[in-house]
Image (tube, helix red, strand yellow):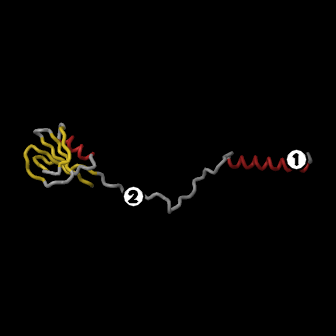
Amino acid sequence: MKNWAKGLLATIIAGVAVYWLTTGLKSHDTRVPPTNPTTASVDYPPQPQPRMSPLERDTNRNDSDYGSFETGSPESCSTSCLTDKNCKAMTYNTQTRICYLKNDTPPPTFFQGVVSAVKEHR
């Protein structure tokens, strides 16, 4: 091999070695690109989470029933309404232990032995 070819080969090898040493032998660029303001995520305010109103003792919310079942307490009836996306109110009969889920919010009326609550969005 001619001397000039050996020198050229040595220069190429040295250049590759310097490149590898300065880039840390990485095969790709790991730098994070700058954020593009047109594609940046938007932080929306948190949506209000529904909750049940305080239990309304001796209060009936008549009509608008779409489901009923036996359960042990007005609190469990209220929790069932809270977790059901179709439920807007509930009434629990303490004598029969029946929970009535409502798809509307009927006006309250007095009825002894009945407990009601309304789903609120705050």
Kind of residue at disc 2: Tyr
- Residue at x-position 15% and y-position 47%: 116
Residue at which label 1 appears: 6
Locate residue 72, reporting x and y percent.
Answer: 18, 36
- Residue at x-position 57% and y-position 56%: 33
Residue at which label 2 appears: 44
Direction bottom: furthest residue: 38
Mark toward the start of the polypeptide (2 vs 1): 1
The alpha-carbon separation of the residues under discs 2 and 1 comes to: 65 Å
Locate residue 101, reporting x and y percent.
Answer: 20, 46
- Residue at x-position 8% and y-position 48%: 111
Q: Is mark 1 on a helix, strand or loop?
A: helix
Q: In this view, does 91 lie above or below 48?
A: above
Please identify the quarter of the rendering in which residue 43 is found: bottom left
Q: Nearer the viewer, residue 88 or 54?
A: 88
- Residue at x-position 23% and y-position 46%: 81
Position of 6 compared to 20: left or right?
A: right
